[in-house]
Amino acid sequence: MRILHTADWQIGMRAAHVGKAGPSVRDARLASARRVVEIANERHVDALVLAGDTFEDSDVPRDLVQKVADILGESVAPVLVLPANHDPLVPGGVWEHPAWKDKDPRVRILRSTEPFQIGGALFLACPLLSRTSPEDPTDALQSTGASRDQIRIGIAHGSLRGAGAPDDQIADDFPIKREVVRRAALDYLALGHWHTPSIHEVDGVERIAYCGSHEPTKFGETSEKGASGQCLVVTIEAPGGPPVLESLNTRTLEWRSEKLVVSSVGDLTELRSRLDREPADSRERTLLDLVLTGVISPADATALDDLLVLARERFLYARIRSDALTLRPDGEGWIDQLPAGVPRAVARRLADLADSPNSSSTARDALDLLYRIHAEVAR
């Protein structure tokens, strides 16, 4: 049995946090959804499993529901779609749209916990009926009558207990106990809810996985197993056998985070040059989060302004955070504000070395560090 495991498409996401890049971010989620289906067809999977949060909420424009239904309808294999906390099974919700009634029966909305079979595998789903809950959605899954001549695959959405929830997730929101794998005799549990991929063992075998979102939703969606913007192709050869997981890139846009410690105008100039050399097609699909720290002089301020203008003009989106930069005043008058004795004497010696014709950057870096400490203490 081979399945493609994807989740957290969140089609219809507003993306207000990236300003004018919002429409591009929303379009990318549809483009990446198409890529997921393409991979499923290329790999000849037996089922495409969408483990929840297909939509941002139940109020997304109905034309988007139709678009997603059409995209899923391109899958050769059966498609299993789990309602989850962003798009639960509620009256008037997205799952009552006519698109699902008119679709090929291969696109199946998982509306109950009733097991069903595809090929040699039995699937057990846990659809959600609300936005939040302290209850474990997998409590309904049992092994009663389980036949070990069938591969058993669970599909759920929530926070796996004891797995280290991402900082932006509430660990007690739809908490899932790892022991469900033993209780329900699952060979694999496909989870959604966390946007970063992670894989978890049961009795020494990797049987639980978050595939991560198919397209990043914000900066910082990374984990030890990689970054969001991927899907998992999962192969299980026989009942009780270990799942073999392969991650495949599906992202359309690049969400890039960088940090730079600035000690001279040359650092800003080099950064500007590096950003300027990036190919246009790369810049146009990159959202950049740049954090600057360190010390600059007033003379460096123009170079900083030029860098900010360049980044915002060249990239799809650029967030430049320079609040942590310390502005060093012209001259060395600040040295007289240091405590008398060793601190002031050391600063004056460093200033002399930094101004000497044969000085190295070490003295200037040390002086900048001393000023940064002084500025922090003075705040």
Image: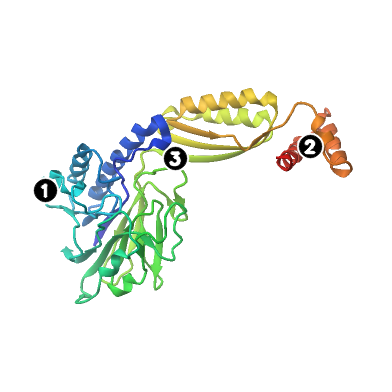
- Locate the C terminus by quadrant: top right
The residue that appears at 47% across and 46% down in the rendered structure is: 220
The answer for how far apart the CA atoms under marks 3 and 2 are is 36 Å
Sort mark 1 into few (<14), some (14-19) or many (20+) by Cα contacts within 10 Å.
Answer: few
Given the current orientation, which residue lies at the most extreme right position?
341
Q: Is residue 281 above or below residue 65?
A: above
The answer for how far apart the CA atoms under marks 1 and 3 are is 37 Å
Q: Which residue is mark 1?
A: 101
Looking at this view, is 353 or 16 the one in front?
16
The quarter of the picture where residue 30 lies is top left
Q: Nearer the viewer, mark 1 or mark 3?
A: 1
Given the current orientation, which residue lies at the most extreme left position?
102
* Amino acid type at image mark 2: Ala
* Amino acid type at image mark 3: Trp
Q: Nearer the viewer, mark 1 or mark 2?
A: 1
Q: Is residue 6 above or below residue 154?
A: above
The quarter of the picture where residue 246 lies is bottom left
* Amino acid type at image mark 1: Lys
The quarter of the picture where residue 154 lies is bottom left
Q: Secondary structure at mark 1?
A: helix
Which mark identifies residue 363?
A: 2
Q: Determine contact: label 3, label 2, CB under 8 Å.
A: no
Q: Which residue is mark 3?
A: 255
Sort mark 3 into few (<14), some (14-19) or many (20+) by Cα contacts within 10 Å.
Answer: many
